[in-house]
Every structure is written in structure tokens, then in C-alpha cells.
């Protein structure tokens, strides 16, 4: 678990307030450590962040199958029984994850997530850990 370098929680709350049916919002590093959260207990946010690290890695592997792409994951959306999961690249080595209930406005969600990433993308990036190559 990491401590936020800056308090992003209020911005995550703003996203949740602007998009009805949002449950949890988590900002995480590429290696699956929570940076900031809203709407989730710390343990829940930590589990979600850890799962997202594997998911973004899987998405990147699939992305390499596109001959003209760069292999970088931009957005993953998973629809499941009970709701939706969104994972968006939020800057170098950082991601924004959102869990939302069924019935969420997918267009509004994508728009607000992109707005949030654009507004605070610099604050969402995380430096590489020692010994890790820069992606």
C-alpha cells in the first residue's frame, strides 16, 4: 500500500458525484499499489488495485497484436452481473479504476474519466520503482 503523494481523494469524489451509480474509484500505480481512493475501504481498494495490475498487463499483451498500435492500454471495460468495471490509463505508470452499478451511463462515465485524467494526469503518474525499466 502507498500513501498518496497529493490528496486526490476529493477529485475522485467529484467523479463519483458527477456520475450516478459509481461505487468505488481508485487510482493505482502500474505495479498495483493504491495511490488514492473514494468509496471503498482501504483493503477493498488495495485488492482492486492489485487485480488491476494484472488486467492492465493482460490488456497490453493483447494490444501488441495490433500491428500499427503501440501496445499501450487506454481503456478496459468489463460488464458483469451487477455492474461495470472501468480501467483507464491515467498517465505514465498510473491508472484510474472505477466500479459502477448496473445502469450507469457508459458515455458519461468515459467522458468524466477522460476529463479527470486530463485535469490531474501529472499528479496521477508514478515514477518507476528502483531497477524497473521505464515503459
Image (cartoon, rainbow, N blue to C red):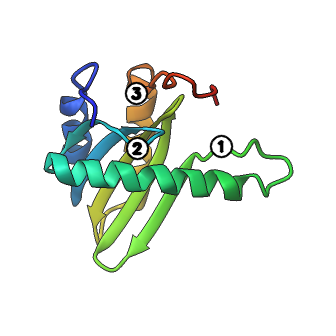
Tell me if I can see residue 58 in this picture: yes
Q: Is residue 103 above or below residue 37?
A: below
Residue drawn at 35 percent across, 39 percent down:
33
Of the pair 73 and 49, the residue shown nearer to us: 49
As rendered, which of 11 and 64 lies closer to the eye?
Answer: 64
The reply to whether residue 108 is visible in this rendering is no
Tell me, for residue 50, which label it has, or none. none
**Which residue corresponds to mark 1?**
72
Q: Is residue 90 above or below residue 6?
A: below
Q: Is residue 87 above or below residue 125?
A: below
The secondary element bearing badge 1 is classed as loop
Distance between mark 2 and mark 3 Cα atoms: 13 Å
Mark nearer the N terminus (1 vs 3): 1
Badge 1 local density, few (<14 within 10 Å), some, or many (20+)? some
Residue 130: x percent and y percent?
Answer: 51, 22
Q: CA distance from mark 1 to mark 3?
A: 17 Å
Which residue in the protein does label 3 denote?
124
Q: Which residue is mark 2?
A: 32
Helix, strand or loop status at disc 3: helix
Amino acid at each position: 500500500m502507498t500513501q498518496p503523494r497529493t490528496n486526490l481523494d476529493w477529485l475522485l469524489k467529484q467523479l463519483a458525484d458527477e456520475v450516478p451509480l459509481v461505487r468505488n474509484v481508485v487510482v493505482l500505480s502500474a505495479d498495483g499499489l493504491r495511490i488514492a481512493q473514494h468509496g471503498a475501504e482501504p483493503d477493498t481498494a488495495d485488492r482492486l488495485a492489485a487485480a488491476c495490475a494484472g488486467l492492465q498487463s493482460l490488456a497490453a499483451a493483447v494490444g501488441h497484436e495490433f500491428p500499427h498500435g503501440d501496445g499501450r492500454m487506454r481503456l478496459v471495460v468489463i460488464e458483469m452481473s451487477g455492474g461495470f468495471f472501468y480501467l483507464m490509463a491515467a498517465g505514465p505508470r498510473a491508472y484510474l479504476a472505477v466500479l459502477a452499478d448496473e445502469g450507469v451511463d457508459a458515455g458519461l462515465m468515459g467522458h468524466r474519466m477522460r476529463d479527470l485524467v486530463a485535469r490531474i494526469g501529472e499528479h496521477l503518474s508514478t515514477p518507476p520503482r528502483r531497477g524497473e525499466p521505464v515503459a
